[in-house]
Image (cartoon, grey):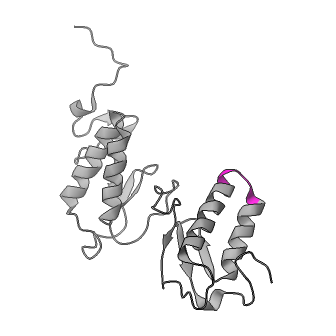
């Protein structure tokens, strides 16, 4: 049988130390390297072997173009406290969020941002959590459509109610002392 040196063999035929797409597959059967501190077992519910198996399984599903299963696996990893950066081919489970070049998957509110810190005190902030999520989602879409003036306006409105957005970590937080008094949700004084 003739061998075509330019054709990639199936992923399952790759073993330790084999090269694919100019990246070395490690001893765990995938390209990803652990970064950060050791696994924080108070946050991460998976063993190191389980993490490696899921990362390898996800890589295989992506190679087979089964993106639906691959997305289910990354969501499972994230829910279990594992953060992954596909561009850098790195993972961590030490409780520190990866500053990724790629946004995480959409959450149940239709945006990428996770709330951190104290819950919103609705006796002080006149925005409901639904309104906050709607504004974060709308701002995200404005940025995608390159309507930065409107995106900045929404950010200013949120800031006026004490809500701060971190676009690098995809997090939002509310603090009473951050709000500017006398502003309603529409930004009117």
Residue 34 percent coordinates (x, y): 33, 59
Q: Between 8 and 60, which is closer to the camera in this rendering?
A: 60
Membership of 22 in magenta stretch = no
Residue 82 visible = no
Region in magenta: 143-148
29 above or below 95?
above
User: Image quadrant of residue 22?
Assistant: top left
- Residue 154 falls in image quadrant: bottom right
The percent coordinates of residue 115 (x first, y second) are 49, 74
Residue 180 shown left or right of residue 99 in the figure: right
Q: Give the quadrant of the N terminus.
A: top left
Q: Quadrant of the C terminus?
A: bottom right
**Who's the residue at 54% across and 75% down the image?**
129
With 15 as the anchor, is 103 left or right in this view? right
How many marks are shown on the rendered structure? 0
Q: Indicate left or right for 52 with 126 as reference.
A: left
Q: Which is nearer the eye, 137 or 83?
A: 137
In magenta segment, residue 147:
yes
Question: Can you tell which quarter of the image residue 162 is in?
Answer: bottom right
Q: Residue at x 22, y 64 (%)?
A: 46
Q: Is residue 176 visible?
A: yes
The foreground one among 128 and 144 is 128
- Outermost residue toward the right in this view: 189
In the image, farthest residue toward the top? 1
Estimate the x, y position of residue 84 in percent, counting from the top left. 39, 57
Which residue does the image show at 22% across and 30% down from the upper left?
13
């Amino acid at each position: 049988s003739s061998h075509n040196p330019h054709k990639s063999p199936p992923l399952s035929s790759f073993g330790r130390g084999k090269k694919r797409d100019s990246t070395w597959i490690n001893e765990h059967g995938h390209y990803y390297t652990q970064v950060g501190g050791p696994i924080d077992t108070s946050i991460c519910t998976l063993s190191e072997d389980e993490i490696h198996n899921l990362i390898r399984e996800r890589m295989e599903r992506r190679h087979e173009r089964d993106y639906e299963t691959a997305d289910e696996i990354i969501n499972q990893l994230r829910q279990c406290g594992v953060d992954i950066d596909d561009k850098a081919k790195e993972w961590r489970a030490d409780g520190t969020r990866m500053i990724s070049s790629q946004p995480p998957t959409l959450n149940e509110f239709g945006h990428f941002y996770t709330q951190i810190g104290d819950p919103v005190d609705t006796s002080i902030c006149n925005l409901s959590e639904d309104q906050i999520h709607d504004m974060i989602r709308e701002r995200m879409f404005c940025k995608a459509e390159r309507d930065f003036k409107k995106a900045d306006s929404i950010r200013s409105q949120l800031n006026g109610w004490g809500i701060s957005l971190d676009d690098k970590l995809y997090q939002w937080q509310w603090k009473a002392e951050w709000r500017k008094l006398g502003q309603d949700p529409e930004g009117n004084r």
